[in-house]
Image (spheres, helix red, strand yellow):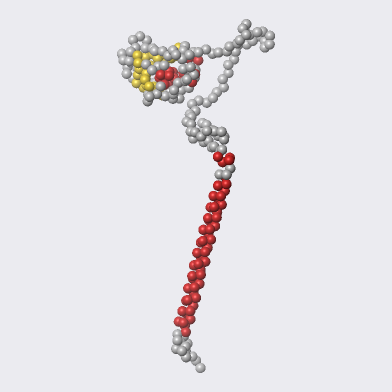
Amino acid sequence: MSGISSGVGLATGLNITEIVDAIIGVQRNALVKLADRAAAFEATEGGIKTLEANLLTLNTSVQKLNLKSTFETLKATSSDSSQFSVAANSTATAASYQLQGLRLSSNHQVVSNGFSDSDTTPIGTDTTITLSRGGKLDDSKLLEELNNGLGVQRGSIRITDRDGQTEVIDLTRTLNIQDVVDEINGSATSIVASIEEDHLVLTDTSSGLGTLKVTEVSGGKTAADLGILQSVAVHFDGRFRLSRHQ
């Protein structure tokens, strides 16, 4: 005997298929909620592990604050390591310095006259031997040696010849008195600088009838330190001298 399957109970007349699907749907919703809760727990667990790692890093850093050596360490850096390499120890003072290399160091040697022997013939007749090189500027003295050791402030000066030609001379990189002479002589003015004994000489070779002037630039004192801060109405050889550098 064949039967007809319609999903409806023969005795009750209820739709069995819909009832079963409804029960399965309720159970499936419960499973989805459980899965969502599990995902939330996993996310919380990940956050706790990240916090733990960050706290471990923080703890390591804080431990260094308990060490005396942490506060005694200084680091020195150079903006141009090709010119200067620097280092600092625990006794260094925190500061910022501006330095500029102008010239590479070179060897220098001074040789005296020969002697007949090393242990017999006396050197002179006095009991004191004095070695010196004199006090002339033409020995190309360092600028730091002038003005009784006070030196010369580096800066720029303005020179005007009798023709009215004016030029600013940059002396910020000069090392010795010869450098000053070279910079002045390299200007476009008619001024010729030279060294005579213990003073500078500036000669105006122009044919103008104006005033030979040397002035400061931007409130400096370079010309004053060099002894050439003057304004002269030249009427003979156009010279004025620096005579106070011994």
Q: Position of residue 193 (x, y in %)?
A: 41, 16
Q: Position of residue 157 (x, y in %)?
A: 39, 22
Displayed quadrant of residue 195: top left
Q: Is residue 146 above or below residue 34?
A: above
Side of 89 where 9 appears, left or right:
left
Q: Is residue 107 visible?
A: yes
User: Could you tell me which residue is drawn at 53 percent across and 58 percent down?
Assistant: 48
Name the residue at the bottom extreme.
Answer: 1
Total number of numbered discs in the rendering: 0
Displayed quadrant of residue 196: top left
User: Could you tell me which residue is drawn at 68 percent across and 11 percent down?
Assistant: 119
Name the residue at the top extreme.
Answer: 125
User: Could you tell me which residue is drawn at 62 percent across and 8 percent down?
Assistant: 127
Q: Position of residue 13 (x, y in %)?
A: 44, 88
User: Could you tell me which residue is drawn at 54 percent across and 49 percent down?
Assistant: 58
Q: Is residue 178 visible?
A: no
Q: Is residue 48 above or below residue 22?
A: above
Side of 169 where 208 appears, left or right:
left
Between 148 and 198, the one nearer to me in the picture: 148
Displayed quadrant of residue 112: top right
Name the residue at the right extreme.
Answer: 120
Q: Position of residue 141 (x, y in %)?
A: 49, 17
Between 5 and 198, the one nearer to me in the picture: 198
